[in-house]
Amino acid sequence: MASTSASTVRQVKLERESELRIEVGNDSPLRLRLLNGTAEIFGTELPPQIWLSFPPRLKFAVFTWYGATIEMDGSTETDYTADETPMISYVNVNAILDGRRNRAKASSSSDASNSSLQAPRVIVVGPTDSGKSTLSRMLLSWAAKQGWKPTFVDLDIGQGSITIPGCIAATPIEMPIDPVEGIPLEMPLVYFYGHTTPSNNVELYKVLVKELSQMLERQFAGNAEARAAGMVINTMGWIEGVGYELLLHAIDTFDANIILVLGQIFSKIPFQEKLCSMLRDVLRKKPNVDVVKLQRSGGVVSRNAKFRQKARSSRIREYFYGLANDLSPHSNIANFSDLSVYRIGGGPQAPRSALPIGAEPAADPTRLVPVNINQDLLHLVLAVSFAKEPDQIISSNVAGFIYITDIDVQRKKITYLAPSAGELPSKYLILGTLTWLET
Ligand code: ATP
């Protein structure tokens, strides 16, 4: 708990259209409340008078459209007010999306395929630390406040706003996103890629993006409300070379019709200009796709590799233990023979002698490779597949994750941490390179 001594309590008065940017201190949470006026955190309105507690190191902004007074209790790494923000342009984008949703809804009863074209499928692109996740979040929360249930698609395997890193996932957003708890984890649709960078297996990444999009298309076919609300797709910060190729792949696969391109203010190379014109060029043949350039907020905080690594680790911790240590994961023991572990791609290649004359042995990036359980699995995070047969593993989404804490080769026993006690929903486990050291 933050200290409640009077000396740390202070009030900040915010003028209209300004924001208070905060980085919570490293050691203790910060308490904050809205004393008067109205204010929001990344699109979600603050309840009046109620103290909210923000965990250490969280970076966020309290924005007000009409003026507000905020009270804070606890220490911050930094806090300052800013009256120059790109919020007006962001909320204007939301107004356009709202119009498209209304049109999609109106036509959904008469012509389903036409309404899919009109429903906004927004993809947010830009370099690392340009505020992509934050903009996605605002657009989702504003839409939910207006009564829509847009689908959030997170393709960023590096951080993961919906579930742990190494996954691509989607979930409907039915309520403005809680500023502390983040995206609700009720029933996300999750595919496990298993690595935190796409270069480990680009083909697999594409296959999973395709699987996710097909699954969403099937859900939209039976749910006009979700279809009309459309999607907001958050992407990785990798926008050059293969990263760019993956962006085009995602735009195509999800039939995105609005591309929001965020910039990077301190970059010498005008990434945003370059990316925008490249996208416009490529998409010339698709007249229904709009490419919109948006300003990056000066409040977006750059995070170095170490910080990102730490954030990944706390995301995994949060999966098992909860944000406020409010979950009780269970340590389970299984026999080696109870579980079937697979890796996707790479692995031992077929011997030349087994191939037709002239063919070169190639490591199929989407080949399913059985893995022997041994010490190498220690400290890995594995996904539990919903597959009923091994050949369904790549196309199946996952039920959740386990963390390997001990391997006893002699007794052929494996100890793992799971969100709950009891049998796993399936014996098929997927392994990647995702590790975690419980601290
Ligand atoms: P990535 O490179 O991981 O894809 P990103 O482009 O999605 O990053 P965000 O995660 O949206 O960037 O923002 C980076 C950090 O800056 C986050 O911690 C976010 O909470 C913080 N942030 C964004 N906007 C503001 C703001 N206006 N004031 C204070 N902090 C902010």
Image (cartoon, rainbow, N blue to C red):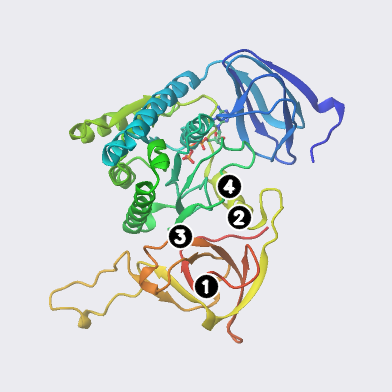
- Disc 4 residue type? Ala
Which residue matches tag 2?
319
Which residue matches tag 1?
376
Q: Nearer the viewer, mark 3 or mark 2?
A: 2
Rounded to the nearest angstrom, the CA distance separating label 1 from label 4 is 24 Å
Q: Nearer the viewer, mark 4 or mark 2?
A: 2
Circles 4, 3 touching at the beta carbon (< 8 Å): no
Which residue matches tag 4?
311
| Mark 3 crowd level (few <14, some 14–19, many ≥20, 10 Å Cα) | many
Rounded to the nearest angstrom, the CA distance separating label 4 from label 2 is 12 Å
* Above or below, 30 relative to 217: above
Residue closest to the eye, 240 or 401: 401
Mark identifier at residue 127: none
Rounded to the nearest angstrom, the CA distance separating label 4 from label 3 is 17 Å
Rounded to the nearest angstrom, the CA distance separating label 3 from label 1 is 15 Å
Q: Secondary structure at mark 4?
A: helix
Residue 153 visible from this viewpoint: yes
Query: In the rendering, at what x and y percent does residue 138 appear?
Result: 51, 31
- Disc 2 residue type? Tyr
Q: Residue at x 29, y 67 (%)?
A: 364
The quadrant holding residue 25 is: top right
Q: Secondary structure at mark 3?
A: loop
Chain-order first, disc 4 or disc 2: 4
* Above or below, 422 relative to 220: below
Which residue matches tag 3?
194
Chain-order first, disc 3 or disc 2: 3
Chain-order first, disc 2 or disc 1: 2
